[in-house]
Amino acid sequence: MNNFRKSFVWGTLFITLLFLSTMRAKESSRPLITPNPKEMSFGSQTVEIKDCLHISSIGNDYGFLHNLTQIYDSIFFKNQNSGFGSSCSNNLLLEVKNSFVMMPAGFNPKDQSYKLEVMSNGNIHIEAQYQVGVLRAMDSLAQILDHSNGKTVIPHVPLEISDEPRYGYIGLLLDISRNYYPMETLKTIINGMRMSKVNVLHLHLTDDDSFPIDLPSFPGMVKHTALSPEEVYTVKDIHEIISYANQNGVKVIPEFDIPGHTRSIGDDPSFSHLMTCLNRISKWQMPDGTRIKGGPSGGVLNPTLEETYDFVDKVINDLRKIFSSSDFVHLGGDEVNTNACWVLDEKIGQWMQENEFANGNELFAYFQQKVGTLAKESGVRTAHWVYQNNWDLKWDEGSVLQYWGDSQYIPKFQETYPDHQHILSVHELFYFDCGLGNRYGVDLCNPYQTWARIKMFEPTDYYSPDSDQLLGGEGAMWSELNTAHNVFNKIWPRLGVISSIFWSGKVEKPFKWGDIVEELVSYRDYLKANGVEANQVTSRYCEANPHKVFDAWDSEDFESIEYLFA
């Protein structure tokens, strides 16, 4: 190697090392907690938990205390021979008003409220209405712990936080019909939800692709309707997930999407007669113009058969028993081609004439009225999807409506359904699969929804801050192209941004993007350090230098260099 090459190699290496040295994480001058707490004050001291941390409680049950140590032992204490114990230098005192209840029914924001105090001597005090508030406090504290040099150090002491979400429903929809997720994957997702202060797991149980739930009323049906014999969830599996979610402060809501998105039911010969449009040809076109058959095709339940309602009634009752702690059962209701699958069907069309139904929407209303009655008789509150092309549809009284249309039509959604409570899942921001292509390799609801675009959404631009009509919001992880591995990078850290929107107060503009990126990177690192994979926020250099990159120019400074951009 000649001298020039040697100089070039060593010079390149020196520049690379210099570049990497600038990318070390910088200690923040403030606690970085996502979502931002409602109220927080902090000091400049640091306190080390030297040996262990003793938990004492006023009125808490021992089962909850055991659960608490199981969750947080490895989070609080890393690379050292310490943990939670009995004879310790530092104490954690819990005061929980409803000490034997994880979380009550409903979505009152105050149910998750907490007060956290870290004193100068390293003792910690948590107050909460329910056990779930303790979890929220523990994750806030865990996010700021410094584990460098094998120690557990609490910075920014003395620290006081008083916190609660501004909306009581912060959710994640997970589609377990289009892809099967192993139990451990589901539990890791729940871990990430707890760390993100997301309190609702909405399971989209069934769709055209599969019906993977082995329900008691239909033994053996999953032999026909699951993706494979191994990709089935038993009642025991579901109970295990519900129990694990509850231990982590997460409610589980089941969805049985009807009358559309039900083709998989027809895979069972015993129920194929309940379907219309079964295996109907779809028009899909590849990028080169080739028209393909597509699949799976859509399927819609036949609303004119009493057997259909017998089937639906049994499913609703099975879900009511299995998900006994759920606040409602989601019954879908979107994307039903009433014209092609009902009106143009010879037998259904004749039935409509005989019963004086003028169009598909009237028949849809008939279906919903009958299903609503079944749900009411079973003591089940329902929820439904609403999109911007079906404003004329009526829904059962007291049902929750989840809007997945464009944000620009939210006012129309409010105007049309003033007597229902709402959940927002605006697809151009909260659909995590958008911009990643569909199952055929062509575009799907472009563009990709970046964390920065999601951050721009503000609920009070549409709903009064004092209104109880809006329950909250939900990110949607549809699963056509997911695996048990890539699902995490699609969900996180964007779910944390949605959580921040519905938990924290309104962010005043102009946004302080340097602060936002600094917080988001710290949150992402917290997830990854505790077993939840998450995507990059930005490039490594920008993550290490968020204020240098993302802070706004002062107007005078920008004017002085504006010529550089001419």
Image (tube, grey):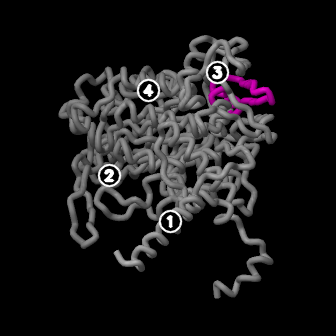
**Residue 166 or 460: which is nearer the viewer?**
166
- Residue for point 70% across, 31% down: 48
N-terminal of the two: label 2 or label 4? 4
Which residue is disc 2 drawn over? 343
Disc 1 crowd, CA 10 A, few/some/many (<14, 14-19, 20+)? few
Query: What span is colored magenta in the figure?
Result: 109-135
Label 1 or label 4, whichever comes before in sequence order: 1
The answer to whether residue 36 is seen in the rendering is: yes
Residue 170 x %, y %: 59, 40
Camera-nearest label, 1 or 3: 1
Image point (51%, 36%), residue name: 530
Which of the two residues, 222 or 413, is positioned nearer the viewer here?
222
Label whose residue precedes the other's in the sequence (1 or 3): 1
Q: Position of 403 compared to 225: left or right?
A: right
Mark on residue 52? 3
Asked whether the residues under the numbered discs 1 and 4 touch, taking CB atoms below 8 Å apart as contact, a structural biologist would say no
Taking the magenta stretch, the answer to whether it contains residue 287 is no
Secondary structure found at label 4? helix
> x, y (%) of residue 11?
49, 72
In the image, residue 448 sits, relative to residue 157, either above or below, namely below
